[in-house]
Image (tube, rainbow, N blue to C red):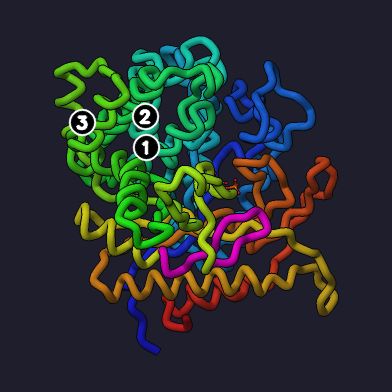
Amino acid sequence: MTTTFAEGFLWGGATAANQIEGSYLTDGKLPSIQDVMPQGIKAPPTDEPTPDNLKLDGIDFYHRYESDLDLFAEMGFSVFRFSIAWSRIFPNGDEETPNEAGLAFYDRLIDATLARGMQPLVTLSHYETPLHLAKTYDGWVDRRMIGFYERYARTCFERFGDRVRYWLTFNEINSVLHEPLLSGGIWTPKDQLSKRDLYQAIHHELVASASATRIAHEIDPGLKVGCMIIAMPTYPLTPDPADVWEAKCIERENYAFADVHCRGVYPGYLQRTLRDLGVELDITEEDRETLKHTVDFVSFSYYMSICASADPDRQIKGEGNLMGGIANPTLKSSEWGWQIDPAGLRTVLNDYWDRWNKPLFIVENGLGAKDQLVEVDGELTVVDDYRIDYLQAHLRAARDAVEDGVELWGYTWWGPIDVVSASTAQMSKRYGFIYVDRNDDGSGTLERHRKKSFAAYRDIIASNGASL
Ligand code: BG6
């Protein structure tokens, strides 16, 4: 069997601290914004953590990481993406010195990952801004966040950079446009937030991201730092040129973030958006210099595509990963209304490669579904052929893109083990190849069970994709 994927292609899975670790106050950690979002983005945050919030305990990865990593290794992972909870390292976010117990936990996790033959791919900020920074500074609206983040990033690079070679600065940085609290730690409710504050917060995040890239490269030029955006190809709903332009404008809302990360300057079309909005940003000369520190690679999540129309009567947005869009009549949807479009992944990979000429990394892709635990040959499992179909179809699209000439470093399936959902905070929205016995009401043994897809992914990895 021949394979298209390069030797050393990184196969694995992706997670985020707040969705798996639990132990939200252990070893000096203080709450992050997630600890007051018991319904994800479906309802406003609570003032304090409440017991109905599944993230407080997650899937208890904090104590079970060794055996979970064993299962990942059994599937043959060569990479494991996880995030560091900022509030374990700087519990409030604005301290001068880090929390040693938090650093020590990630020392153990990184060592255990490497010991099983997996490269760690670490996200510094994955929707888990320390709560104190959100409440006291209004998150990224405040310029002082750049300094707090720089201190945090430097601490992580200095401590872990000898073992972690791949870093992501912000998860889905473009989502701040749609979810200012989740993505930007902005406490002001979305409907009260001015466009000026929103874009100033975006600017601060972009500067902080470039600054982290600079710091990483100063510490060790061999460190690979990437940006991370939501990829959501947007198709014109009809061939009407007005729809085509509308689709382009929506795509540019996503492109803009990676354009700045890859080119080091604000693109003209973003400047026009700001002019049209009447927004004048505070951009210093130092900011402009910092932005020139561009990323080594571009990473993205890919779950779905959307359609766009210029017709005001057709603006009904469907479900979808944070922003959603008009439903595509040619596609089927997941149980949560996310439209399944493997071919869109090939389009995205080709577009991104053509646009930025930087190596690409698919750091999230997956299917959230309601799974049924059954007994087969005396073992509890889930017969998740729907997930296997999704996986294979998307990997075939990735293979086509590699054959098209795209440089692709790796693929990490979202939630290789069931995690608490980001948008809905449910357990029943399951992505894993490994079932976790925990329910939406918090009950369950937390036992792990291999689903049918576990072996399917293991076989794909074993053949380096040749079996697809
Ligand atoms: C991405 C996030 O948006 O999608 C993850 O980076 C998230 O944190 C994933 O879990 C799937 O979304 P959800 O809402 O189904 O958990």
Compare residues 275 and 132 and report the one nearer the observer.
Answer: 275
Q: CA distance from mark 2 to mark 3?
A: 16 Å
Q: Amino acid at mark 3?
A: Leu
- Residue occupying the point 39% across, 21% down: 195
The disc, 3 or 1, on the residue closer to the chain's N-terminal end is: 1
Percent across and percent down for residue 194 are 43, 18
Residue placed under numbered mark 1 in the picture: 169
Q: What kind of element bears circle 3?
A: helix
Compare residues 323 and 39 and report the one nearer the observer.
Answer: 323
Q: What kind of element bears circle 1?
A: strand
Residue placed under numbered mark 2 in the picture: 153
- The answer to whether 422 appears left or right of 311 in the picture is right
Principal SS element in the magenta part?
Answer: loop
Residue placed under numbered mark 3 in the picture: 291
The disc, 2 or 1, on the residue closer to the chain's N-terminal end is: 2
- The answer to whether 69 appears left or right of 377 in the picture is left
Compare residues 143 and 103 and report the one nearer the observer.
Answer: 143
Q: Quadrant of residue 215?
A: top left
Percent across and percent down for residue 455 are 62, 74
**Region rendered in magenta:** 331-344
Q: What kind of element bears circle 2?
A: helix
Percent across and percent down for residue 444 are 83, 48
- Residue occupying the point 68% across, 16% down: 47
Q: Closer to the camera: disc 2 or disc 1?
A: 1
Q: Residues within 10 Å of mark 3 (few under 14, many from 20)?
A: many
Q: Amino acid at mark 2?
A: Ala
- Cβ–Cβ under 8 Å for marks 2 and 1: yes
- Cβ–Cβ under 8 Å for marks 2 and 3: no
Q: CA distance from mark 2 to mark 1?
A: 8 Å
- Up the image or down, 418 lies above or below 385; here it is above
Residue 153 in view (yes/no): yes
- Residue occupying the point 41% across, 12% down: 96
